[in-house]
Image (cartoon, helix red, strand yellow):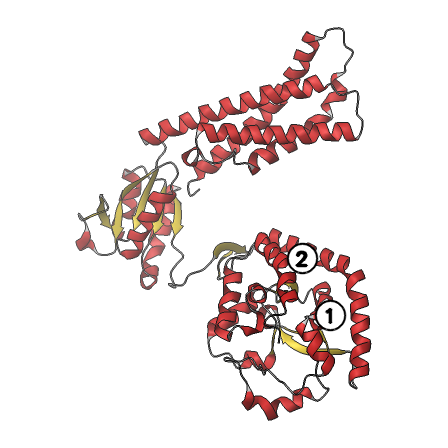
């Protein structure tokens, strides 16, 4: 949805849906009175349903794709989307009326509304789609763009614009810093001048937008273009990929009068992150009645098996490389950290992590709680504290992080560490470090709430198999 016209059409259809729904509801009430003139029903007792009905209808229409742009759908798909949206909304409403035993609401009004609403919303979308297709064919609403630059970045931009411009696009022409290129044709459009001609071009042509697509080495030449667009009242866009890096999200923030361009290598939706945090906290609290007795029994076994505390607390590297105390049940002797230096040459793992099949530092109880992952349960307290999430890359020790030999390995610190991740359901500690890292990066780049849910469902099976437990 590159063009603002798409957003305007979306809003228009939305407001038309609301208006049509209100009119249809009132009409349904009148139809009910016409069919049963002697029935005693009151309009005011029905109007309180209208806000709830509007919320349900619009929400489900959006969910089922009834607001998709006409370019990407068909009349049949629109009808199916509207049918599902209206049917589910009415179904929920009737269920609520039945559950709360509301008798003074006429079911005939509700069912009449459903039928007329479906037909009205489908007809609206047929007309909207027809208008869109006629407009697209005629080019009347096509986006008229002047591009500054003729290099590879400009050519890449054209290809993207042709795909993303929903209402069609017309390249008015190009301006290039090199006057010798004037008169050349690129993708069917002419280089109509150099940067010195910007004022004349904006005056003589119908232009919706100017897009700057010149190398960063020439950005100092862009100021006259900015001033010219400001004078003419023409929208100016600027290709922000000036550093040749792949970023997941680009945003512009105003800090007072200073615009700050933000390049984020990992795109994370703040609303989804909030839901993730609420989900983590709620699930962890619900699990506590089961977890606490297990911890109590394991703690007693640890104390009987070897002297020392029940818990092992170690500083780990978390979100944005901030340290936090990670809790585990103690599975090693109390002098394990000092003995690591003596046996580090026996490391069987590649990369910065340490792994040894018959590690002499592990106690008898330690072998069992590691194999069953019971030693990890205290990290649920880290989840409650907000240091960790249920799903995320494993938090690494300061020692291991100091041994990282590639910068990209530190991308794992762009998200909260977790109790489980893709590595946990793919072999756990049997995996070589490079594969472990690869799976962590795969999780970060493809993160979604649904992915977290799938990982959580598969984790108990992986734990019960005890394969790859360190």
- Above-or-below relation of 447 to 84: below
**Residue bearing mark 1:** 378
Residue 164 placement (x, y as % from top left): 38, 44
- Could you say whether the residue bearing mark 2 is in a helix, strand or loop? helix
To which quarter of the image does residue 245 belong?
A: bottom left
CA gap, disc 2 to disc 1?
Answer: 18 Å
Task: Give the residue pinned by disc 2.
Answer: 277
Q: Is residue 19 left or right of residue 280?
A: left
Q: Residue 18, relative to residue 358: is it above or below? A: above
Q: Is residue 257 visible?
A: no
Say whether residue 352 is left or right of residue 104: left
Q: Residues within 10 Å of mark 1 (few under 14, many from 20)?
A: some
Quadrant including the N terminus: top left
Q: Is residue 21 above or below residue 390?
A: above
Q: Position of residue 400 (x, y in %)?
A: 56, 80
| Residue that appears at 75% across and 59% down | 287
Which marked residue is nearer to the observer: mark 2 or mark 1? 1
In the image, residue 173 lies at what x, y percent? 26, 44
Picture layout, residue 128 above or below residue 318: above
Quadrant of residue 392 within the rendered picture? bottom right
Badge 2: residue crowd in 10 Å (few <14, some 14–19, many ≥20): some
What quarter of the picture does the C terminus occupy?
bottom right
Residue at (38% x, 41% y) in the render = 165
Tell me the number on the disc at residue 112.
Answer: none
| Residue most extreme to the bottom | 342
Q: Secondary structure at mark 1?
A: loop
Query: Which is more toward the observer, 176 or 230?
Result: 176
Point out the tag, 2 or 1, that comes first from the N-terminus: 2
Is any part of residue 453 visible from this angle? yes
Q: Single out the residue that lies furthest toward the top.
A: 38
């Amino acid at each position: 949805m590159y063009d603002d016209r798409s957003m305007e059409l979306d809003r228009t259809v939305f407001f038309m849906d609301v208006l049509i729904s209100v009119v249809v509801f009132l009409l349904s009430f009148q139809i009910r009175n016409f069919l049963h003139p002697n029935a005693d029903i009151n309009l005011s007792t029905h109007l309180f349903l209208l806000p709830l009905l509007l919320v349900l209808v619009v929400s489900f229409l959006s969910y089922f794709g009834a607001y998709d742009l006409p370019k990407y759908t068909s009349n049949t798909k629109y009808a199916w989307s509207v049918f599902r949206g209206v049917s589910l909304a009415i179904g929920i409403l009737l269920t609520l009326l039945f559950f709360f035993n509301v008798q003074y609401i006429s079911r005939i009004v509700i069912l009449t509304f459903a039928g007329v609403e479906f037909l009205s919303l489908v007809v609206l979308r047929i007309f909207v789609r027809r208008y869109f297709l006629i407009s697209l064919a005629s080019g009347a609403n096509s986006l008229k763009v002047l591009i500054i630059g003729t290099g590879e970045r400009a050519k890449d931009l054209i290809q993207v614009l042709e795909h993303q411009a929903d209402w069609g696009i017309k390249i008015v022409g190009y301006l290039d810093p090199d006057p010798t290129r004037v008169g050349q044709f690129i993708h069917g459009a002419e280089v109509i001048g150099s940067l010195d001609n910007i004022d004349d071009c904006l005056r003589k042509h119908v232009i919706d937008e100017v897009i700057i697509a010149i190398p960063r080495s020439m950005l100092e030449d862009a100021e006259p273009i900015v001033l010219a667009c400001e004078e003419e009242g023409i929208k100016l866009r600027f290709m922000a990929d000036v550093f040749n890096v792949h970023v997941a999200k680009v945003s512009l923030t105003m800090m007072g009068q200073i615009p700050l361009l933000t390049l984020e290598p990992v795109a994370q939706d703040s609303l989804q992150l909030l839901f993730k945090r609420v989900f983590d906290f709620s699930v962890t609290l619900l699990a506590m009645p089961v977890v606490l007795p297990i911890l109590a029994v394991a703690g007693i076994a640890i104390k009987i098996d070897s002297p020392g505390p029940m818990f092992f607390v170690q500083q780990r590297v978390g979100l944005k490389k901030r340290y936090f105390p990670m809790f585990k049940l103690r599975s090693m002797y109390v002098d394990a950290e000092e003995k690591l230096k003596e046996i580090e040459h026996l490391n069987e793992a590649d990369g910065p992590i340490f792994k040894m099949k018959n590690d002499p530092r592990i106690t008898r109880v330690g072998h069992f709680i590691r194999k069953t992952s019971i030693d990890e349960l205290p990290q649920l307290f880290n989840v409650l504290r907000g240091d960790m999430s249920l799903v995320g890359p494993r938090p690494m020790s300061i020692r291991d992080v100091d041994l990282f030999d590639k910068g990209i390995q530190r991308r794992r610190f762009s998200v909260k560490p977790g109790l489980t991740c893709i590595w946990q359901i793919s072999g756990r500690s049997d995996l070589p470090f490079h594969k472990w890292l690869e799976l962590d990066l795969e999780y970060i780049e493809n993160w979604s709430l649904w992915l977290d849910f799938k990982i959580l469902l598969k984790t108990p099976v992986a734990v019960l198999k005890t394969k790859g437990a360190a």
